[in-house]
Image (cartoon, helix red, strand yellow):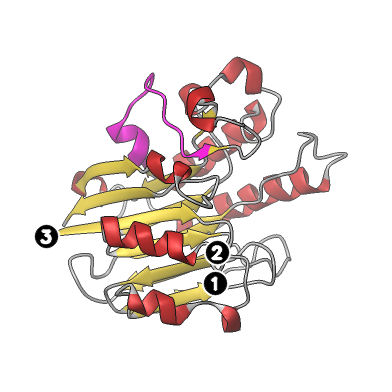
Amino acid sequence: MTLTIATWNINSVRLRIETVARFVAEHQPDVLCLQETKCIDGQFPLADVKRMGYEHTAIHGQKGYHGVAVFSRFALKDVDRKAFCDKNDARHIAVTLAEGPGAGTRIHNFYVPAGGDEPDPAINEKFAHKLGFLDEMEAWDALRVGGGASKTVLVGDLNIAPLEHDVWSSKQLTKVVSHTPLERRRLTEVATNGGWVDMMRALTPEPQKLYTWWSYRSPDWDAADKGRRLDHVWLSPALAPAMRQVKVLREARGWDRPSDHVPVVATLAL
């Protein structure tokens, strides 16, 4: 039995609901985790989601900003939404699969702050917020999964490309937010101290380039190929033996009205 979990920063779910429907029709993930949905819960297009075959949903919305959601073909339980940094931003939701091949698996869906343009917390409040968010992720007991039998998955737009080959040019981006040495070190510490396995890099090791995001500012994103790996799939050690495949749907960046991120689909054999 396999379980497929997809993660995608959709950059407005209402604006791109037909794009979501196309992805689901073509790839049929069992669980789809979205970030940056940008709408309050009462305006979420749940009827469209159900037509895609997802009877079970968990949403955490916010007007015009942020927002995370989980759609599932299997029943969900223990839905939690955690606030970080004393803000009410909708940046996290967690669910547990109550049935199916992944029954008992806990899924955390994150949208980490982007951090603004200036990588200096002393002068940039957004960057300070991002670092504080990472501090709280690292300190949270629920994200410490090493050494036990916990079946846990962490996915989402973590807004950091931690490795040299997670960006098109590490040298040129070393002072650019999302790939600064400080961010890279802090995200690595969150993963390492929590005991997480980076599924994408476990299956596609460096030095192979691996991107999930291409800027809207590039007039020809495909030819320029100046991407970054901002979207991640982490597993608890107990799930690591189950990992089989990760697909990055690069072609989705070229669809009509695309997000600047593309879907990432992880397959586990359970």
User: Looking at the picture, which amino acid does disc 2 mark?
Assistant: His
Direction from residue 190 to residue 1 in the image, left or right: left
Residue at image coords 62%, 67%: 90
Q: Earlier in the sequence, mark 3 or mark 2?
A: 3
Residue type pointed to by label 1: Arg
Residue 54: image location, x then y, percent: 33, 75
> Sequence-wise, which precedes: disc 1 or disc 3?
3
Q: CA distance from mark 3 to mark 2?
A: 28 Å
Left of 236 or right of it: where is 108? right
| Mark drawn on residue 1 | 3
Q: Circle 1: is it few (<14), some (14-19), or many (20+) Cα within 10 Å?
A: some
User: On the rendered structure, is 189 left or right of 241?
Assistant: right
Task: Determine contact: label 3, label 2, CB under 8 Å.
Answer: no
Seen from this angle, which residue lies furthest right?
Answer: 123
**Which residue is rendered at x = 79% and y = 35% of the image?**
118
Disc 3: CA contacts within 10 A as few (<14), some (14-19) or many (>=20): few
Q: Quadrant of the N terminus?
A: bottom left
Residue furthest to the top in view is 171
Q: Are marks 2 and 1 in contact (CB under 8 Å)?
A: yes
State the residue at coordinates (27%, 69%): 104
Q: Which mark is residue 92?
A: 2
Residue under label 1 = 81
Circle 3: residue type: Met
